[in-house]
Image (cartoon, rainbow, N blue to C red):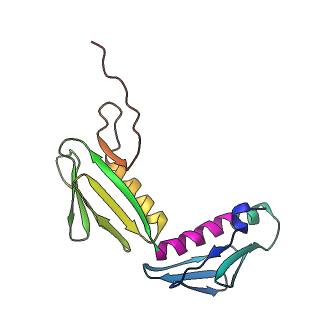
Amino acid sequence: MSRIGKRPIAVPKGVTITLDGQTVSVKGPKGDRSWTVAEEIEVKQENGELTLVAREDTQRARAMWGLSRTLLDNMVVGVTDGFTRKLELVGVGYRAALKGNDLTLQLGFSHEVDIKAPEGITFGVPKQTEINISGADKQVVGELAATIRKLRPPEPYKGKGVRYSGEKVRRKEGKKK
């Protein structure tokens, strides 16, 4: 039995959920998302809550039960509050700027790195060394943050690079004299 799958998903006010067979559509103030649930899972909507039930007791059904519940909950949270990832730029001359909706980074290369904002994603640059990535889709926000971090990951000697906000970088000792 899935402990995660058993928990109901509360549907806040302002969010409409449409069930069309196995396809679940969620519409809210920050956008709309839809996803097709696996055949082994049954989705029910009652009393302002979504509940998921496994139709059979197989290993795949149990695995998809918890996964489906988590993904549907992320959709509901995404269209109401949205998701945000914060990145920090550490290093001399490392800075970020917005050009329209797109992000321009200077990361110590001989050129600037331009990143186009995918649909539904917004960039924020409160300071030159901070980047906020916001959107309704948790997977796209996280993947874009990982892509930006991969451009210049933090190096262990001076700690320079792009890191997640609050990330601890293990520092190595330099050469001995």
Residue nearest the viewer, comparing 150 with 17: 17
Bounds of the magenta segment: 66-80
Residue 72 is covered by the magenta coloring: yes
Give whichever of 7, 120 is nearer the camera.
7
Front residue (pair 71, 35): 71
Give residue 169's quadrant in the image. top left
Can residue 84 be seen by looking at this rendering?
Answer: yes
Please provide percent x and percent y for residue 32. Answer: 47, 81
In the rendered picture of this protein, how many numbered marks are placed on residues?
Answer: 0
Residue 95 among those drawn in magenta = no
When the figure is inspected, residue 136 is found, relative to residue 3, above or below; the finding is: below
Observer-nearest of 110 and 68: 68
Quarter of the image with the N terminus in it = bottom right
Q: Is residue 118 visible?
A: no
Above or below: residue 165 compared with residue 59: above
Q: Main secondary structure of the magenta part?
A: helix
Residue depicted at 31% across the width and 22% down the height: 174
Q: State which quadrant residue 18 falls in.
A: bottom right
Image point (32%, 30%), residue name: 157
Residue 126 x/y as whole percent: 25, 60
Specify whether 49 is left or right of 1: left
Residue 91 image position (x, y, % from top left) = 24, 41
| Left or right relative to 7: residue 104 | left
Q: Residue at x 37, y 74 (%)?
A: 119
Q: Is residue 91 left or right of residue 76?
A: left
Q: Quadrant of the C terminus?
A: top left
25 on left or right of 128: right
